[in-house]
Image (cartoon, rainbow, N blue to C red):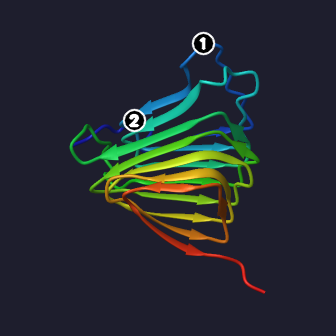
Amino acid sequence: PGSEVADEGVLFESCNFNCSGVGSYTVDAYAVGKVELVGCECKGSHTTSSLRVRQCSLFHVRGGSHTQIQMEYSTGADRPADTTSSYELSGLSRVGDVLVTLLEEGSFRMVSCPHAGEVTLRGDRNHEIRGCSLGSLSLNDTSSVSLRFSSYGSALGTGTLDVETWSG
């Protein structure tokens, strides 16, 4: 069996994660169950700091703002006891660059994030982005994304992009 750490879940609410080191992590979770951040910020953190999550069964961020976010999941690495994987960002007032790598399992959804940096999707999964404004979008490997009611500066890569825009 996999790791049972945070199997019942860990909730961070209205927290300020602050780290000053170059390339440091505001949160760094590996092979744990459920982690939720609600209304958390990373004010004062170095611009290269990241919130990093790898091999988690559920990671949801609702509200707040974060400098950079990295999310990974692969069936070939250590996994939590609950081997499903659901990553979601919703209602963030501001988020820097977002990097998502999902191999063989997992889902990523980004909803109502009006100010986001570059979003890079890697791996072989389908993703959903709805109601967001992205700096740019990079689709790598065989990843695909359904982009609904969102805007982006540019798109590049080998993945598949399905866009639905506003009409009127």
Q: Any mark on residue 105, and which?
A: none
Which residue: 68% across, 65% down?
131
Q: Where residue 7 sits in the image (x, y, percent)?
A: 41, 44
Query: Taking 163 as reference, is 64 left or right?
Result: right
Q: Residues within 10 Å of mark 1 (few under 14, many from 20)?
A: few
Which residue: 38% across, 52% down?
140
* Image quarter hosting the N terminus: top left
Q: In the image, which is nearer the foreground, mark 1 or mark 2?
A: 1
Q: Any mark on residue 21, and which?
A: 1
Q: Where residue 143 sits in the image (x, y, percent)?
A: 37, 59
Query: Taking 79 as reference, is 26 left or right?
Result: right
Q: Nearer the viewer, residue 142 or 46?
A: 142
Q: Amino acid at mark 1?
A: Gly
* Image quarter hosting the C terminus: bottom right
Q: Amino acid at mark 2?
A: Val
Which residue: 24% across, 39% down?
77
Q: Is residue 26 above or below residue 77?
A: above
Q: Secondary structure at mark 2?
A: loop
Q: Where residue 108 sits in the image (x, y, percent)?
A: 48, 57
Q: Which residue is mark 2?
A: 5
- Image quarter of residue 124: bottom left
Q: Is residue 127 above or below residue 69?
A: below
Q: Secondary structure at mark 1?
A: loop
Q: Is residue 113 above or below residue 69?
A: below
Q: Residues within 10 Å of mark 2 (few under 14, many from 20)?
A: some
Query: Taking 27 as reference, is 85 left or right?
Result: left
**Which mark sits nearer the N-terminus, 1 or 2?**
2
Q: Where residue 51 sits in the image (x, y, percent)?
A: 56, 33
